[in-house]
Image: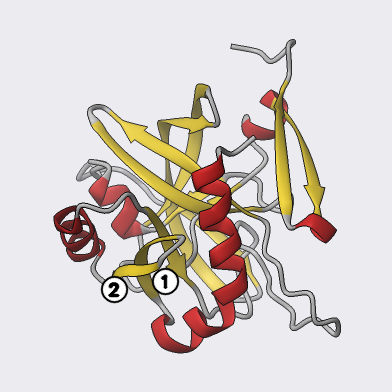
Amino acid sequence: MTNIREQKNLEWLNRNIQTLRKNYSNQYIAYNAKGVIAHAQDLDQVLELAQASGEKYTIYFVSRRIGAIVILPIHIRSISRHEWLPNYSIQLKHQEIEISATMLVDSGADFTVISYAMGKKLGFTLADSEQTLPAQGLGGMANFVLRRLTMKIDDHSFITPVAWLQDKHCFIEEIIGREVVFDKFNIEFRQAEERIIFTWRDDAFD
């Protein structure tokens, strides 16, 4: 389960998601329960400003996408007024680089998906001869490559594959998909309480 600080951050994010989409659409934000600390389309700039603030923070991409490819979420305007999004605060780590991020938990996504900017910040590179993989969906085509990184959810760290998008201008929210993650945890969505509970499986494979 998320700690108290992370839960308060998520509660603030859920209460203010519409305002964030209006003011910071297609931008990264560094935020905590007090509000937005920094924002920009450039992830490096956001991280630099957030670190300089001295505040504890997490990173979230404010998406305005409606349609999406198969590895991305599809947002349909709800008839109801309950506009909670199943976001969760986690840590991503590659080599010595670690970033705290808020990601959308999406049972419809095969893989965890990160943006081009996030992958670059984590230190991913593309080999000269490496072929990208295409994905087709409602939003058209998108190219990605598969990478592996360490993900930490609550107190549990593990290696998981991620789809690293290669379009620098494909602005998306970071997504937690099913591969590996949904095998290692039992995941309970409590929409009425606006909470997600990750329970580590004792039989989770290594």
Q: Which residue is mark 1?
A: 171
Q: Which residue does the image show at 27% across and 53% down from the upper left?
A: 55
Q: Is residue 90 left or right of residue 83?
A: left
Mark 1 Cα-neighbour bin, 10 Å: few <14, some 14–19, many ≥20: many
State which quadrant residue 112 falls in.
Answer: top right
Secondary structure of the residue carrying numbered label 1? loop
Q: Give the quarter of the figure containing the N terminus.
A: top right
Q: Is residue 68 left or right of residue 169?
A: right
Question: Residue 129 is drawn in which quadrant?
Answer: top left
- Please give the residue where the numbered disc 2 appears in the rendered image: 41
Tag count:
2
CA distance separating discs 1 and 2: 9 Å
Location of residue 187 in the rendering, given as x and y in whole percent from the top left corner: 76, 37
Kindly indicate whether the residue at mark 2 contacts the one at mark 1 (C-beta within 8 angstroms). Answer: yes
Describe residue 176's horizontal placement relative to residue 148 as left or right. right
Q: Position of residue 95 (x, y in %)?
A: 26, 27
Neighbour tally class for label 2: few under 14, some 14-19, many 20 plus, Cα within 10 Å: some
The quarter of the rendered structure image containing the C terminus is: top right
Identity of the amino acid at label 1?
Answer: Phe
